[in-house]
Image: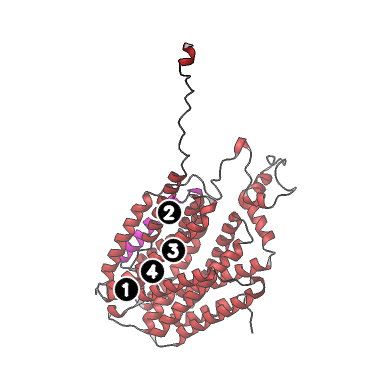
Amino acid sequence: MASSSQKVEKPVSPEPQPEPGPGRELQSWRCLVFYLCFYGFMAQMRPGESFVTPYLLGPAKNFTKEQVTNEITPVLSYSYLAVLVPTFLLTDYLRYKPVLLLQGLSYISVWLLLLFGHSVLHMQFMEFFYSLTMAARIAYSSYIFSLVRPAQYQRMAGYSRSAVLLGVFTSSVLGQLLVTVGKVSFTTLNYISLAFLTFSLILAMFLKRPKRSLFFNRSEPAHGEASPSELDKMHPGPGQPTGRKLRGTLLAGWRDWVLVRMLRELRASLRLPQLRLWCLWWVFNSAGYYLIVFYVHILWNVVDPTKDTTKVYNGGVDAASTLLGAITSFAAGFVKIQWALWAKLIIGGVTAVQAGLIFLMYSTSSIWLCYVAFVLFRGFYQFLVPIAIFQIASSLSKELCALVFGINTFLATVLKTIITLIVSDKRGLGLQVHYQLQGAVALPLSCPAVPHA
């Protein structure tokens, strides 16, 4: 009976392990979101950017309007066209972070040349480095999606865009307050911008480098098999390369390259009327938009050539246009329209209003009308941009969508560069800024997507 008095030892079950970390993963994701957004905000803190043109035309540098309009500013279009495609490819191949570091170094080079350069050649190099920063902006927008899961894409896009717009708005307001209220000189403002940009470069050094990217560094295939692309998943069929032998010839390998497959898919997708419509709007309207943005500060100086720097309100206008652009971009997400039926009418109406605003800037002698017209012009453009992105993305896969945006941007840059060479450059017509606006009026209205009278 002794055995009955003994306690039967129960097998010790292993202690329950904590869940593999949904809480820890959520905390890590929140920290990542905060750091990325903080970096995106700080990278936009350039309070001297709104006042670069009056700084170049003022006593600190003493360049003439003709030098700024016909010799310095056109370099931005040429160099941006030259570096756009290489930067796009390097961004993906190097997995984003090195290109963000290059962007930070280029920004610092821009402001060092602004502060210590004295010749037209120095300012032309300044425009070249600024074109590098513009081309590298794709690295940030692509980088954030490579670190999070697809379920988090929409929220990350909203957070990152809000951080960037808030940074631009804060930078413009700060610059305007320092100039108008603090009586700070443009030179001191540029030193402050240089300090902010140095800090943002330090932040970029601590960014996490992704292990994958969109085109060159794809996820590793399992068991040595080729992993199908999103295009293959979306369009399965007998043409899939499952049993096909592509190792024989160089031509077969070339045809199997992901970028070539995507170009073939793009050719088929362009048969969709809505896709062609929004792509044409993107190319023509973006070219006109950036021509206005590049030269509008010169126009303001021509309309109101004041010597009192405290009465230069470029920062306030940039802040107002950024805020209106953010509001219209947000509102565009709630517009519910049968776009297949009304797209041409809306594009035509918005573009006609934009052309009227440009004509107002061209014809008026009131600087305040110029300011208001530019704010509205930028707001209308930002209203249609998210709609165009949605309309293009809704009919394409993620990979193909990135390629289409890249091609649209490249074609818009080519068109803008051709117009700059003919109209602005001193080797072309070398027209004054008022006459250049006439070309900007005609450019959006020439889009085949816009109905003509």
Q: Give me the residue at 47% from left, 44% from top.
A: 22
Between marks 1 and 4 in the image, the one whose residue lies nearer the viewer? 4
Q: Position of residue 127 (x, y in %)?
A: 40, 65
Q: What element carries label 2?
A: helix
Q: Residue 162 carries which label?
A: 3
Q: Do the residues labelled 1 and 4 touch (CB within 8 Å)?
A: no
Q: What residue type is labelled 2?
A: Val
Q: Earlier in the sequence, mark 1 or mark 4?
A: 4
**445 in relation to 4, above or below:** below
Q: Which mark is residue 107?
A: none
Calculate the distance from the C-alpha at mark 4 to the C-alpha at mark 3: 10 Å
Q: Is mark 3 on a helix, strand or loop?
A: helix
Q: Position of residue 317 (x, y in %)?
A: 38, 76
Calculate the distance from the C-alpha at mark 3 to the C-alpha at mark 1: 21 Å
What residue did someone put label 4 on? 169
Calculate the distance from the C-alpha at mark 2 to the C-alpha at mark 3: 12 Å
What residue did someone put label 2 on? 33
The residue segment tinted magenta is: 93-116
Residues packed near mark 3 inside 10 Å, few (<14), some (14 to 19) or many (20 plus)? some
Calculate the distance from the C-alpha at mark 4 to the C-alpha at mark 2: 20 Å
- Dominant SS in magenta: helix
Q: Position of residue 301 (x, y in %)?
A: 36, 80
Residue 66 occupies quadrant = bottom left
Q: What residue type is labelled 3?
A: Ser
The reply to whether residue 420 is visible in this rendering is: no
Residues packed near mark 2 inside 10 Å, few (<14), some (14 to 19) or many (20 plus)? some
Q: Residue 176 carries which label?
A: 1
Calculate the distance from the C-alpha at mark 1 to the C-alpha at mark 4: 11 Å
**62 or 198, nearer to the observer:** 198
Q: What residue type is labelled 1?
A: Gln
